[in-house]
Image (cartoon, helix red, strand yellow):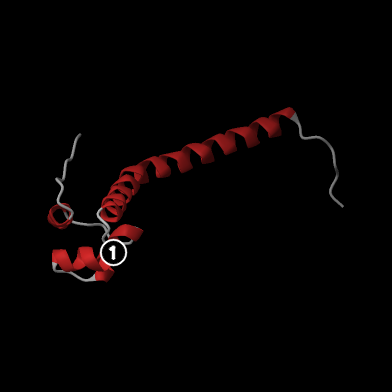
C-alpha cells in the first residue's frame, strides 16, 4: 500500500516545473493553430451570412462540397489560389497581413 506521506519540497517543486513545461508546450501548439482556426471560422461565418450551404459555395467555385467540408473542418490546408477562389465566391477580398 502506498504511503500517504506528504511530498518533499524538492519533489513538489519538480512536479510544478514539469506542469509549467507541459503548459508552455501546449500553449505554443495552440498559438500556432490560432490563425488557421480564425481563417476557417471567418469562411464559415461569411458563408452562413450569405445564406449559403457548403454545396452552394462549392458549386460557385466549381469544386465539390467535400472540398469545402475539408477546408472548414481543418483537414485540408488550402493553397493561396484556393483561398482566392473562396473569397471571390463569397464576394469578398482576401487580405493577409504580417
Q: Position of residue 28 (x, y in %)?
A: 41, 40
Task: Indicate whether 65 appears above or below 95.
Answer: below
Report x, y in % for residue 92: 15, 47
Residue 33 located left or right of residue 97:
right
Disc 1 packing (10 Å; few <14; some 14–19; many ≥20): some
Residue found at x 27% / y 58%? 51
Q: Number of numbered discs present?
A: 1
Q: Where residue 21 sits in the image (x, y, percent)?
A: 52, 37
Is label 1 in a helix, a strand or a loop?
Answer: loop
Q: Between 25 and 86, which is closer to the camera in this rendering?
A: 86
Whether residue 70 is situated above or below residue 32 in the rendered picture: below
Quadrant in which residue 60 is drawn: bottom left
Q: Nearer the viewer, residue 63 or 25?
A: 63
Q: Is residue 43 left or right of residue 12?
A: left
Please name the residue shown 36% across and 46% down the image: 33
User: Residue 40's spot in the image, x, y percent?
Assistant: 30, 51
Is residue 77 rendered to the left or right of residue 30? left
What's the residue at 52%, 38% (across, down)? Answer: 23
Q: Quadrant of the C terminus?
A: top left
Return the residue found at the far top: 9
Q: Which residue is mark 1?
A: 53
Amino acid at each position: 500500500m502506498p504511503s500517504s506521506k506528504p511530498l518533499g519540497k524538492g519533489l513538489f517543486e519538480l512536479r510544478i516545473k514539469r506542469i509549467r513545461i507541459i503548459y508552455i508546450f501546449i500553449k505554443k501548439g495552440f498559438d500556432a493553430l490560432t490563425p488557421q482556426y480564425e481563417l476557417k471560422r471567418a469562411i464559415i461565418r461569411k458563408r452562413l451570412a450569405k445564406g449559403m450551404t457548403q454545396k452552394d459555395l462549392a458549386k460557385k467555385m466549381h469544386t465539390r462540397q467535400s472540398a469545402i467540408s475539408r477546408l472548414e473542418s481543418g483537414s485540408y490546408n488550402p493553397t493561396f489560389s484556393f483561398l482566392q477562389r473562396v473569397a471571390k465566391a463569397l464576394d469578398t477580398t482576401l487580405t493577409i497581413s504580417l
